[in-house]
Image (cartoon, helix red, strand yellow):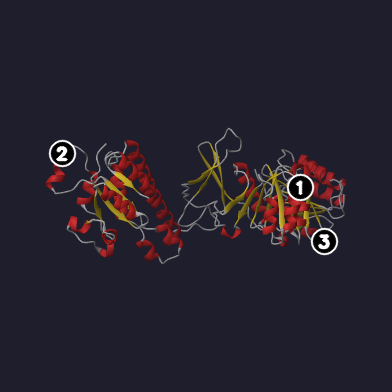
């Protein structure tokens, strides 16, 4: 381990640099510093050599050129061999054993929506050069790229006579190259988006998905699988999941977050108070109502058996009445909502293990893309966020829909969009809103999904409707729906047997509408 005698310090973020530099000087480590950093250190009575004095070149072009000099980079890149050391002495170059650098805040400048010229001024050149030169020579140069490293490095220097272990030097270099790589990626992403934005109807030509771990989760989908949550810091987009905040309960799991995310997508479609119960990535009940507690009760009553151990999502603040209903519902894993009233929180927190999550729906800046890993690559698609337009629906049956049926069908279709295919949703009009009464999901034949949904729905009221995520390949589903009292059906259409299906609807006096839009979810 080479003893560190000299450090170059050039930092934009001055946090904790005074304490760190003072610690270096107490250990006898000499400091070279760039203009602003040098001025700050000297103002705190910390001896520092100005880089301009050392190189005998002033900072140039308004600070654009400060550390780009052979006396700096040769001091970092020189190896511990006779030839390199001889060249250093010949050119009066000091060996540098440590680099302390953090970079201009480029991403922050973009997110503040500054003018292009101001944003470009925040592209750090010299800092990145120092990181890369030092990290390339990590066998003898320590490269610090974050204030979070200062305390640990000072402690190791104190304990080892100004020396750092090979592992520490290697880890610092890896982190420095990671910082440099991410910095360049963000710049590239911004410039690509600024000068060559992708048309809204096309996927991006290049996707940069370098992710940073927020935290480890309890486990993955199963206890034998590791799981974690990651986010992407981006100059153009924010794909973070940190808008979800846990405020109570057991440690959150992989499955909890996946189900909570689905719950949020469903209820966020509605302006009225909405509630949904999710189990194993599938809705088992959903409702909207003027009162949130009624919406929850209707959603829960759709399938009480499946709701056991489920996750409940809301689009409005949970009030005391709703909280009481949640308590009476029995075992639930997790609740997610934009907020909780104080009395509601007091009630819910009595359940020690119940996970309570808050989400800021307004903070959604997602790319609206979905990803699925396959062997050798990644499948990418836009999320299915297409708004249904009732005006574009086509009534194909002899019997035409009344306005109430259309409203109920629209509600059912919004839920069906998030049910795994084959998906069937049976729904009804309630006193102050709408509610599902039966959901059939994930079946390999549509008739089986229909059978399950109708079985769960039980006895029908007068205006119960049915929504399907895909077309009916045969007339059997329509005939079964008619026997169980369904009055209206909505589906995309497009089957080679559409005429037979429509004929079955006419024969049983069922209203049938085609949307022309499929909503498979696999």
Q: Which residue is rendered at x = 61% and y = 58% of the image?
A: 361
Q: Marks 2 and 1, Cα distance to the nearest angstrom?
A: 78 Å
Report the residue marked by disc 1. Answer: 329
Whether residue 128 is visible to the viewer of this picture, yes or no, is: no
The residue furthest top is: 224
Q: Position of residue 298 (x, y in %)?
A: 78, 53
Counting residues from the start of the chain, the first of labels 3 and 1 encountered is 1
Q: Residue 285, position in %: x, y?
A: 75, 49
The answer, for residue 452, to whether it is visible in the render is yes
- Gap between marks 3 and 2, in whole Å? 91 Å
Question: What residue is rendered at 43% in x and 61% in y?
Answer: 110
Tag 3 near tag 1, CB within 8 Å: no
Check contact, mark 2 vs mark 1: CB within 8 A.
no
Residue 83 disc label: 2
First in sequence: mark 2 or mark 1?
2
Q: Position of residue 492 (x, y in %)?
A: 72, 51
Q: Quadrant location of the C terminus?
A: top right
**Residue that mark 3 sits on:** 402
Depth check, front residue: 493 or 442: 442
Q: Earlier in the sequence, mark 3 or mark 2?
A: 2
Q: Give the percent coordinates (x, y) of residue 142.
A: 30, 44
Q: Is residue 351 above or below residue 43?
A: above
Q: CA distance from mark 3 to mark 1?
A: 35 Å
Label 3: few (<14), some (14–19) or many (≥20) C-alpha neighbours in 10 Å: few
Q: Find numbered disc 2 in the image and state the secondary structure of the residue it sits on.
A: helix
Q: Is residue 158 left or right of residue 410?
A: left
In the image, which is nearer the foreground, mark 3 or mark 2? 2
Q: Secondary structure at mark 3?
A: loop
């Amino acid at each position: 381990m080479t003893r560190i005698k000299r450090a170059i310090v050039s930092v934009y973020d001055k946090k904790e640099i005074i304490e760190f530099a003072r610690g270096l000087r107490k250990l006898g480590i000499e400091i070279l510093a760039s203009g602003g950093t040098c001025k700050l250190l000297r103002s705190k009575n910390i001896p520092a050599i100005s880089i301009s004095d050392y190189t005998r070149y002033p900072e140039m072009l308004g600070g654009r050129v400060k550390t780009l000099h052979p006396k700096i980079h040769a001091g970092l890149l020189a190896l511990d061999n006779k030839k390199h050391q001889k060249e250093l002495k010949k050119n009066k170059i000091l060996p540098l054993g440590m680099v302390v650098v953090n970079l201009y805040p480029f991403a922050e400048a973009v997110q503040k929506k500054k003018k292009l010229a101001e944003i470009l001024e925040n592209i750090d050149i010299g800092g990145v050069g120092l990181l890369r030169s030092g990290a390339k020579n990590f066998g003898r140069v320590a490269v610090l790229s974050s204030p979070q490293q200062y305390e640990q490095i000072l402690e190791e220097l104190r304990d080892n006579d100004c020396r750092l272990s090979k592992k520490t030097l290697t880890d610092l270099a890896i982190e420095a190259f990671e910082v440099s790589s991410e910095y360049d990626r963000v710049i590239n992403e911004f410039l690509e988006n600024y000068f060559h934005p992708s048309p809204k109807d096309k996927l991006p030509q290049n996707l940069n998905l370098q992710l940073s771990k927020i935290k480890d989760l309890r486990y993955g989908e199963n206890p034998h699988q590791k799981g974690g949550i990651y986010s992407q810091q981006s100059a153009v987009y924010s794909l973070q999941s940190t808008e979800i905040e846990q405020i109570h309960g057991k440690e959150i799991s992989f499955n909890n977050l996946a189900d909570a995310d689905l719950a949020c997508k469903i209820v966020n479609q509605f302006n009225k108070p909405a509630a949904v119960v999710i189990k194993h990535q599938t809705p088992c009940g959903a409702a909207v109502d003027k009162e949130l507690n009624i919406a929850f009760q209707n959603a829960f009553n759709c399938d009480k058996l499946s709701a056991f151990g489920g996750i409940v999502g809301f689009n409005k603040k949970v009030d005391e009445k709703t909280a009481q209903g949640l308590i009476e519902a029995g075992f639930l894993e997790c609740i997610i909502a934009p907020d909780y009233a104080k009395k509601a929180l007091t009630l819910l927190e009595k359940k020690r293990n119940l996970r309570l999550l808050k989400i800021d729906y307004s903070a959604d800046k997602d790319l609206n893309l979905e990803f699925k890993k396959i062997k050798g690559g990644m499948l990418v698609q836009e999320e299915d966020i297409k708004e249904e337009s009732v005006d574009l629906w086509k009534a194909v049956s002899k019997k035409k829909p009344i306005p109430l049926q259309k409203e109920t069908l629209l509600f059912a279709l919004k839920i069906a969009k998030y049910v795994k295919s084959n998906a069937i949703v049976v729904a009804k009009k309630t006193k102050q809103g709408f509610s599902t009464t039966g959901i059939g999901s994930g079946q390999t034949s549509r008739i089986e999904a229909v059978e399950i949904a109708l079985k769960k729905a039980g006895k029908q009221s007068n205006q119960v409707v049915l929504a399907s995520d895909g077309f009916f390949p045969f007339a059997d589903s329509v005939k079964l729906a008619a026997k169980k009292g369904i009055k209206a059906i909505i589906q995309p259409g497009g089957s080679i047997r559409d005429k037979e299906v429509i004929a079955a609807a006419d024969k049983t006096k069922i209203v049938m509408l085609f949307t022309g839009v499929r909503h498979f979810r696999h």
